[in-house]
Image (cartoon, rainbow, N blue to C red):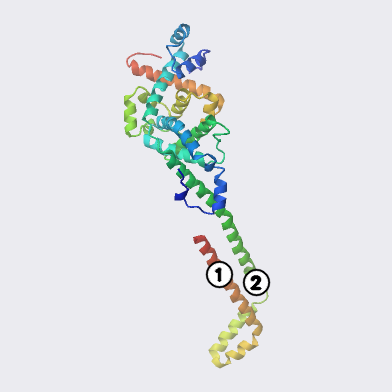
Amino acid sequence: MPWDFALPNPLAGEADATAQHTAAQMDNSVFAAFYERSARPLWAYLVRASCDAALADDLMQESYVRFLCAERAPSLVEDGEVAARLYLFRIATNLLHDHWRRPRAASIDELPEEFFTADSTTAQTEAQAELGPALLRMKPRERQLLWLAHAEGYSHREIAQVTGLAATSIRLLLFRARRRLARILREQHQPAGGSR
Amino acid sequence: MTFVSCNCEKEIRELVESGQWPLAAPPELKSHAAQCRTCADLVLVATAFQRVRATTIAAAKPASAGAIWWRAQLRSRQQVFERIQRPLLGAQVFALVALLLPIIGFIAFEARHGLAWLTWFGKASQSAQLHAGDLSSSASTGSASGLIFVVVAAAAFALVAGVALYFDTERK
């Protein structure tokens, strides 16, 4: 569907020429197909990392807009969908970090867990699920790492690309996060037990 | 917390992510996972995440791709427009500075050489107070100063016109 009719066209020649390097680089139908395949996993990542469905909606849309406008974004045709998807997740992760930094000038790891337990219906629904309460007890960065590793199946190198952390530290961070979550999950199943 | 790695991690992870754990897993691997703390954690966490991923993705209701595309196009053009505006603004500022510099230089030159045109103002005001009829004779004696006055007036007009043009362009 052409959208140009609804858009202002300032300095027509230059605008169109520059747009070829960004948004128009990707054909509308190619983008629609890519969006169809990647939007749901991206939303799932954002909603599980932030525990806020409304925020996930906003950040997902903003991630795609920035992806389309970015001049250095990987091309779907030349670089492949995996690279494009990693870049998209990287944008989303940065947006999440920006959002977490905005209200308080503290590191995201120092923010209280109550901040992330948004009073949204999704969070309440999650609380009834198996993993929801356990995830709420994890730090945001741990949730991100665990989701990227075990839900998206990314390698340590890919997680490093998405999160901006050093690839060498991913392994240890992931190990600690996984052990902590496993302990919480076991505690949920055996509240009175002394499992380690 | 001591970091403990296990050689079976990769194999177990692949089986879980492909949805083949535990049905397609070899019995020895399953027994190992039951004994190894690292692999047990991996199985517990990875299977939970796989289940949650499926339910979360099913619950997702993303906006239409066309709306996202439209927003991106709009922002892209806005960025291009801002990029083009920047040198234009620079050129306008440069033109204003180029206009102001000669005027300031002229005023400085005149100030250094005795402010001859200011004395003309003094004479004119004195003569106006004394005799209105003598004003013409006073002006005729200061013909050189009158020329300077015209130049200053023209410069002031050019300055005001330049500033007005600048703000008009900025507004548009």
Residue A68 appears anywhere in the view: yes
The amino acid pointed to by label 2 is Phe
SS type, badge 1 = helix
First in sequence: mark 2 vs mark 1: 2
Task: State which chain disc 1 sits on.
Answer: B
- Residue B169 locus on image (x, y percent): 53, 62
* Residue at image location 50% in from the left, 14% down from the top: B11
Q: On the image, numbered disc 1 is attached to which residue?
A: B161
The residue drawn where x is 46% and y is 31% is: A38
From the top left corner, tell me how far across and down residue A131 is, in percent.
37, 23
Q: Nearer the viewer, residue A55 or A19?
A: A19
Q: Label 2 lies in what chain?
A: B
User: Which residue lies at the image location 46% right of the left edge and 46% below the top edge?
Assistant: A3
The residue sitting at 38% across, 20% down in the picture is A184
Same chain, labels 2 and 1: yes
Q: Which mark is residue B106?
A: 2
Q: Is residue A109 visible?
A: no
Quarter of the figure that contains the N terminus of chain A: top left
Rendering coords of residue B34 (x, y %): 43, 9
Disc 2 on helix, strand or loop? helix
Instruction: Please determine whether, in this image, residue B25 is positioned above or below residue A130.
Output: above
The disc placed on residue B126 is none
Dot 2 surroundings within 10 Å: few (below 14), some, or many (20 or more)?
Answer: some
* Relative depth, front residue between A121 and A33: A33
Dot 1 crowding, Cα within 10 Å, few <14, some 14–19, many 20+: few
In 3D space, how far apart are the residues under numbered discs 2 and 1 (Cα atoms)?
18 Å
Question: Identity of the amino acid at label 1?
Answer: Ala
Q: Position of residue B107 (x, y in %)?
A: 63, 72
Quarter holding residue A121? top left
Q: Quadrant of the C terminus of chain A?
A: top left
